[in-house]
Image (cartoon, helix red, strand yellow):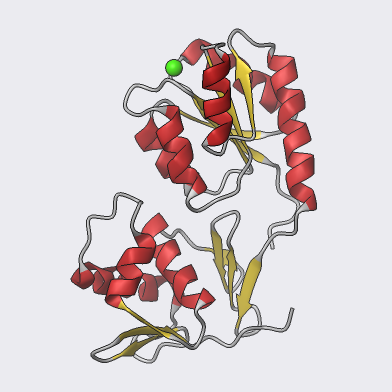
Amino acid sequence: MDTGRKDSVLIIEDEKKISDIVRAYLEKEGFRVRNAENGADALTFFQEGPDIIILDLMLPDMGGEELCRIIRESSNVPIIMLTAKSGEEDRIKGLGIGADDYMVKPFSPRELVARVKAHLRRAGKTKRKILSYNRGSLQMDLERHEVVKAGSPLQLTLTEFKILTALAENHGRILSRNQIVNIVQGYDFEGYDRTIDAHVKNLRHKIEKDSKSPEFIQTVYGVGYKFIGTPDAE
Ligand code: CA
């Protein structure tokens, strides 16, 4: 699915001067570029499944380390950290929280682009994990956070994506609402058991032909939910 597309880069940086330069260099090399100027926008754009992230350590609403930690809870996307601090302690800290690389400002945009390419080459060698059900009618790319229904990409919220993939990965097993809450927590999930029902309802509207006789997510009354799609052969 979606093979011929350009690689996408998410730049999380509040200094417009820097992000504009980096964007210009990357676009010249054929990348699709998104720029988030704060952590909240970054988490929204992250749902689009960027191929690589460039993350500034100092953001207006959130530390880059915190953001990195949140992203790492659900993704192995390569992260290159930008830092104004050149102290060794900060570098080690940056890598300890899951960043793959770092660059100290001021840096050469050309070198950053070279590192972006190197990380993408490396990431491309690790096999993408795609779950496919009902003869390809529903596919989930766990790495890129993409879900495709009958050939068309769906717009799922991060919570919906987490619920769907949690159910799919526990294929045939019933997950209680409580278990689902635990799985999706860590994404600013202001939720209790009941809100899971609301998310599942929205999810069904997006993935089921007929929500009343679902092909994928079955309600097990009084217990929870079960994924019932038929996995395709690898
Ligand atoms: Ca900054």
Q: Is residue 54 visible?
A: no
- Residue 41 sits in quarter: top left
Between residue 75 and residue 11, name the one nearer to us: 75
Is 23 above or below relative to 32?
above
Q: How many marks?
A: 0
Task: Point out residue 31 in the picture as x, y percentages from the top left corner.
Answer: 69, 34
What x and y, as percent, mark residue 206? 41, 71
Q: Is residue 149 above or below residue 10?
A: below
Quadrant hosting ligand 1:
top left
> In the image as oriented, which residue stretches furthest toward the top?
106
Look at 43% across and 80% down and name the residue there. Answer: 208
Q: In which quadrant of the rendered image does the C terminus lie?
A: bottom right
In this rendering, would 178 be left or right of 162? left
* Viewer-closest of 57 and 211: 57
**Residue 143 versus residue 118 in the image, above or below:** below
For the N terminus, the quadrant is: bottom right
Residue 207 visible in the displayed image: yes
Q: Residue at x 22, y 67 (%)?
A: 195
Q: Quadrant of residue 194?
A: bottom left
Name the quadrant containing residue 88: top right
Residue at the outermost front position = 89
Q: Is residue 40 left or right of residue 132?
A: left
The one of 18 and 73 positioned closer to us in this rendering? 73
Residue at position x 72%, y 24% in the image? 113
Query: Where residue 15 appears, x then y in whole percent?
Result: 46, 14
Left or right: residue 127 versus residue 38 is right
How far from the left and from the top, in percent, is residue 225?
36, 83
